[in-house]
């Protein structure tokens, strides 16, 4: 009797295990959903840029040029971008930003500034629509030639772009993601995300005394100098600029990033107002995440504007970025 009872218990347990396993497989089975809004994504999809789940993960990114000037601070929307590129644009070190939005829709984005040629390959590398307020001659020539889908505020001021009387020109130009997407649609631009994506993952953190970094200093001059401070408990980096906390005008919260990329490259002076920064080719890179640093190289095909910007470790493997917001600080020599 005892033997039969054990057999019954074992058989019952096996049946229950099979049922649980079958239920788990059914519950996690992928299904195909059709008929979605072209600017929306299937629930559960992850952003190709940030690696985070978001409702707009299938939406084409929008890259917006933003001012770096002290009088434009705080910027609106800067803290909600999936990735931000910052680089010097003049011989005396004035910087500009390109904020790229996919997951979030800030209530306002600005101060919007002019297109610069060196940001175009970076915008194209993400497959984004490039939004700007006018631009330098060489940049506009390329944009007018169709190098990348773009939306110029000089053509749509008062509709897609607007000015705020509370701020002085030329620093008072603003827009929203919704307005930009509306114009992109009317221009016939592709609406879906085509970026192949960054490598993402949460690998086990391997830190030693030489790689632990809690403070990152970007030595842009004067009011443009940047400081990133790692918050050990929250495991993200908080940004300061010119000795003050960098906050988003929309929320009043300090700007933060999960990954900070310091991309080292070369530049040359074109005139008293312009420099040319090399953003294609290759160079050294340091990636900061999880409170530690990873040394490696960046690479971008100089013969293909839309080629991806890669980050490799010293063994030649693509570096996995922790899911979250990314800031790329371009440092020139």
Image: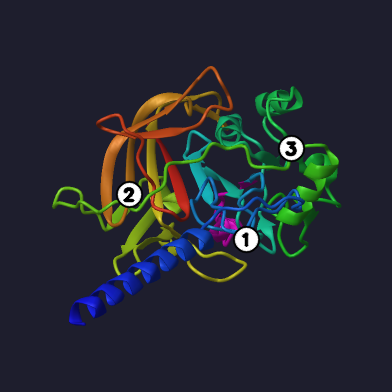
Tell which tag, 1 or 2, sits nearer the viewer: 2
Residue at the extreme left: 209
Q: Secondary structure at mark 1?
A: loop
Q: CA distance from mark 3 to mark 2?
A: 33 Å
Q: Of label 3 and label 2, which has the lower sequence position?
A: 3
Whether residue 72 appears in magenta in the rendering, the answer is yes
Seen at 49% across and 33% down, the residue is: 91
Label 1 crowd (10 A; few <14 / some 14-19 / many >=20): many
Magenta span:
65-81
List x then y, in percent, for residue 74. Answer: 57, 62
Label 3 crowd (10 A; few <14 / some 14-19 / many >=20): some
List x then y, in percent, for residue 270. Answer: 54, 23
Residue carrying label 2: 288
List x then y, in percent, for residue 212. Answer: 21, 54
Q: How is the image coloured?
A: rainbow
Residue carrying label 1: 76
- Note whether residue 175 is visible: no
Q: Secondary structure at mark 2?
A: strand
Residue carrying label 3: 190
């Amino acid at each position: 009797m005892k033997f039969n009872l054990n057999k019954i218990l074992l058989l019952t347990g096996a049946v229950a295990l099979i049922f649980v396993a079958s239920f788990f497989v059914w519950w996690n089975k992928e299904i195909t959903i059709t008929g979605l809004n072209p600017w929306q994504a299937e629930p559960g999809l992850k952003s190709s840029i940030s690696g985070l789940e978001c409702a707009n993960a299938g939406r084409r990114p929008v890259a917006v040029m933003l001012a770096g000037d002290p009088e434009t601070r705080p910027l609106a929307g800067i803290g909600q971008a999936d990735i931000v590129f910052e680089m010097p644009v003049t011989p005396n070190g004035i910087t500009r930003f390109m904020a790229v939005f996919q997951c979030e829709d800030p209530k306002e984005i600005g101060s919007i500034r002019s297109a610069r040629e060196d940001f175009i390959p970076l915008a194209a590398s993400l497959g984004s629509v490039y939004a700007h307020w006018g631009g330098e001659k060489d940049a506009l020539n390329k944009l007018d030639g169709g190098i990348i889908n773009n939306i110029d505020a000089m053509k749509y001021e008062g509709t897609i772009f607007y000015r705020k009387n509370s701020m002085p020109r030329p620093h008072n130009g603003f827009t929203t993601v919704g307005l930009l997407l509306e114009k992109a649609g009317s221009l016939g631009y592709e609406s879906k995300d085509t970026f192949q994506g960054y490598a993402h993952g949460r690998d086990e953190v391997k830190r030693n005394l030489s790689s632990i970094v809690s403070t990152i200093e970007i030595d842009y001059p004067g009011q443009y100098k940047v400081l990133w401070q790692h918050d050990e408990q929250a495991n993200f980096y908080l940004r300061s600029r010119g000795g003050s906390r960098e906050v988003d005008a929309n929320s009043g919260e300090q700007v933060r990033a999960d990954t900070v990329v310091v991309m080292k490259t070369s530049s040359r002076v074109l005139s008293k107002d312009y420099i040319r920064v090399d953003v294609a080719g290759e160079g050294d890179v340091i990636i900061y995440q999880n409170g530690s640093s990873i040394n490696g190289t960046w690479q971008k095909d100089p013969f293909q504007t839309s080629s991806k910007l890669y980050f490799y470790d010293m063994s030649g493997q693509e570096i996995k970025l922790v899911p979250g917001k990314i800031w790329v600080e371009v440092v020139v020599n």
